[in-house]
Amino acid sequence: MPFDVLSCNAGSQVPFNTLSLPEGGDIFPVKPIEGLARARERIIARGKSRSLHVAIVGGGPSAMEIAGNVHQLAHEKNLLPPEITIVAGHAILPHAPERVRNLTARYLERRGISILTDTRVRKVRKESLLLDSGESLPADIIFLAIGVKPSPIFSKSGLPVGPDGGLRVNKYLQSIAEPNIFGGGDCIYFEPYPLDKVGVYAVRQNPVLLHNLMAAFAGTPFQEFHPGGKYLLIYNLGDGYGVFNKWSLTFGGRLSFRIKDYIDRRFMHTFQADEH
Ligand SMILES: Cc1cc2nc3c(=O)[nH]c(=O)nc-3n(C[C@H](O)[C@H](O)[C@H](O)COP(=O)(O)OP(=O)(O)OC[C@H]3O[C@@H](n4cnc5c(N)ncnc54)[C@H](O)[C@@H]3O)c2cc1C
């Protein structure tokens, strides 16, 4: 499809090809997010007649959120209580402050969620995980939360990419090689300095991206993208609990979740169709 100006917003994927996966089985990478709706259906369908073993591979924020929200789902849908295990690799939340890690672990463990640290998965099987200790962990439902990588379309495109394979862009969110190609969100490598793959940046970039796409048509000056300061981090740990962190302020509990829920709903509200 020909284009005059292109905006790349293809996001990221879980690089699950680094694990050899079996055919079939209820195995769900945490992205694309659409796949999580299917995981939800499978848990509801299978969890009515027996207690499921749910295993989450990975120890980052999405692993924590999935674990807590599977617990909530089972409770809400009156399923038999699942056995939820996070296989976290070396440690949970390696990039988060220690207090965030401790609070998160406490909120999950007190609801019966097991966290295995210093444990890696050697092989994903259809209904179990082979751990590096040689032990087998039963797993009816498996989530893969091993981090994300930008969409692979750029590494095949011949355009300059960053070390993670993301479209390499300058301070105008513009490809460093093709002046009519722009991008934002998880699929770019922001050359001035690498950014975390969080929606916060995708959201902050969008007004600049829109401006620069229009400027490319009009031949008017571009805007620079400034990522802004440290972003607010709130984990949704299910059952109405959250963990909040910004600068040195960290707290957990229902208030954290309510703040996150309020911010997310307010943001989504801006995209609702006007019914009047
Ligand atoms: C469980 C979980 C919880 C998260 N919670 C938070 C949070 O609380 N706060 C936060 O800031 N971030 C959070 N994130 C990260 C956040 O989801 C991402 O940073 C954000 O979605 C990136 O937005 P994006 O538009 O760049 O890409 P995506 O949201 O990945 O969207 C990319 C879109 O492009 C489509 N696409 C992909 N390839 C192609 C193609 N070849 N052709 C056409 N279309 C294509 C995809 O189907 C998708 O619709 C979370 C992530 C996960 C997995």
Image (cartoon, rainbow, N blue to C red):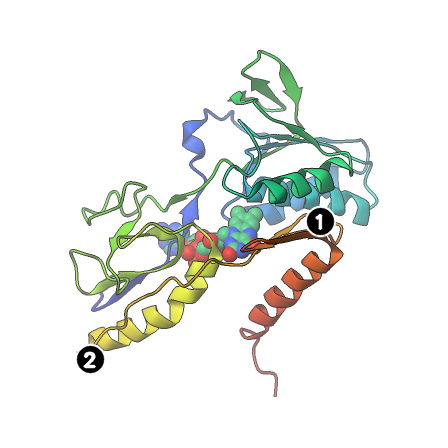
Relative placement, left or right, of 272 versus 262 is: left
Tell me if residue 190 comes above or below residue 152 in the rendering. below
Q: Is residue 33 visible?
A: no
**Location of the C terminus (image quadrant):** bottom right
In terms of secondary structure, where does tag 1 sit?
loop
**Location of the N terminus (image quadrant):** bottom left
Tell me if residue 245 comes above or below residue 208 in the rendering. above
**Amino acid type shown at disc 1:** Gly
Q: Which residue is mark 1?
A: 238
Relative placement, left or right, of 247 versus 106 is: left
What is the x, y in percent for residue 94?
Answer: 52, 37
Ligand 1 closer than 8 Å to label 2 CB: no
What is the x, y in percent for residue 165?
Answer: 30, 43
Please, which residue is most extreme toward the top here?
A: 134
Query: Which tag, 2 or 1, sits closer to the chain's start?
Result: 2
Image quadrant where residue 102 sits: top right
Q: Which residue is mark 2?
A: 220
Nearer to us in this view, 244 or 43: 244
Image quadrant where residue 212 sits: bottom left
Name which residue lies at 49% across and 26% down. Answer: 21
What is the x, y in percent for residue 65?
Answer: 63, 45
Image quadrant where residue 234 sits: bottom right
Circle 2 crowding by C-alpha within 10 Å: few under 14, some 14–19, many from 20: few
Name which residue lies at 75% across and 56% down. Answer: 254
Name which residue lies at 45% across and 33% down. Answer: 16
